[in-house]
Image (cartoon, rainbow, N blue to C red):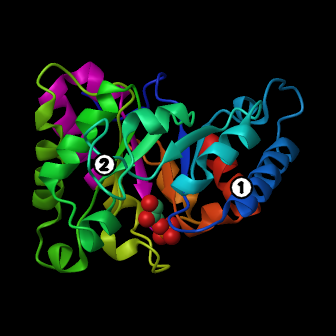
Amino acid sequence: MVNGTRAARRRPLAAGNWKMHRTRAETVRLLKTLAARLEERRPAAADGPPVAAAGAEVVVCPPFTALGDAARALEGTGIALGAQNLHWEDEGAYTGEISAPMLVECSCRYVIVGHSERRQYFGETNETVRKRLGAAARHGLHPILCVGETWEERRAGRTKQVVRTQLTSALAGFPDGAPAGLCVAYEPVWAIGTGQAARGEDAQEVAALIRQLLAGLFGDDAAAATRILYGGSVKPDNILEFSRQPDIDGALVGGASLDPSSFAEIVERVAR
Ligand code: 13P
């Protein structure tokens, strides 16, 4: 049994995907406000950086251009930095792309891979997702692998089949074990940016499937240790519906992560 009660090792995670929002200057301002909001919510008895006290891990993923400034702004806050994509080669003639070593140099610890907007607008396929995951793993970046069905796929009863294919083909390049620090984000495409979040029980059903598939690929222990996030119109007033599910360990947040007060509230609720 790999699902059910949350394994003690699975620390809740709240990750903010800023997408193509915020300049360098705006990023620094947003992060300073976020750190202050988290500090305000620190439990009275806790010491250490604001986030360590909150009981959840917090990651922000600003645009590439702001990563350097973000890294400096985050020093001492306990908030980790992530990127929104990476190329599979370390360097080469790939105009417009960014490699894993470049992200590591910017102090990134996480990287989002296979977001549905990349699949939808930029030709991302399960094959390129697999290659990008490989690059993340080679360089010690913790991947946040995104999977999720479209509305048409859900209506046709194909949700589980789509998620199964996305997950297993992305992870086919790892015969010897899961990439270190792997997180999987279940993000139904129809719930992203629409204000229409999934129902908690539906998200749980897919999260349980993901954990079951991970157990088949990597064994029960690895599956029990992997964090599974929900993403798609997460807000402070609906996050508990997801974070209280046994197989959901936090959230990948788009729009609400651009508002420091909302994101701090989500962090607090994810940590509960
Ligand atoms: P929203 O929270 O804006 O729906 O975006 C979700 C998302 O795509 C996170 O990666």
Q: Is residue 48 above or below residue 129?
A: above
Q: Is residue 183 left or right of residue 268?
A: left
Q: Does 266 appear above or below 270?
A: below
Q: Position of residue 258 (x, y in %)?
A: 65, 64
User: Can you give x and y, in whole percent of width and height, for residue 70 in the image?
Assistant: 67, 46
In front of the other: 194 or 123: 123
Which of the labelled discs sits on residue 155, or is there none? none
Residue kind at label 2, given as amino acid type: Ala
Q: Which residue is mark 2?
A: 207
Q: Is residue 213 magenta?
A: yes
The residue carrying pointer 2 sits among few (fewer than 14), some (14 to 19) or many (20 or more) residues within 10 Å by Cα, namely many
Prevalent SS, magenta region? helix
Q: Are marks 2 and 1 in contact (CB under 8 Å)?
A: no
Q: Nearer the viewer, residue 214 or 203?
A: 214
From the Cβ of disc 1, is ligand 1 less than 8 Å away? Answer: no
Callout 1 secondary element: helix
- Disc 2 on helix, strand or loop? helix
The span picked out in magenta is: 206-232
Residue 147 horizontal side relative to residue 29, left or right: left
The residue drawn where x is 56% and y is 58% is 239
C-alpha separation, residue under disc 2 versus residue under disc 1: 23 Å
Query: Residue 202 location, x and y as percent?
Result: 32, 62
Q: Residue at x 56, y 37 (%)?
A: 106
Does residue 89 show up magenta in the picture? Answer: no
Q: What is the number of the mark on residue 265? A: 1
- 6 versus 33 height, above or below: above
* Residue found at x 82% / y 55%: 33
Quarter of the image that includes the N terminus = top left
Identity of the amino acid at label 1?
Answer: Glu
Q: Is residue 260 above or below residue 131?
A: below
User: Residue 122: in sight, yes or no?
Assistant: yes
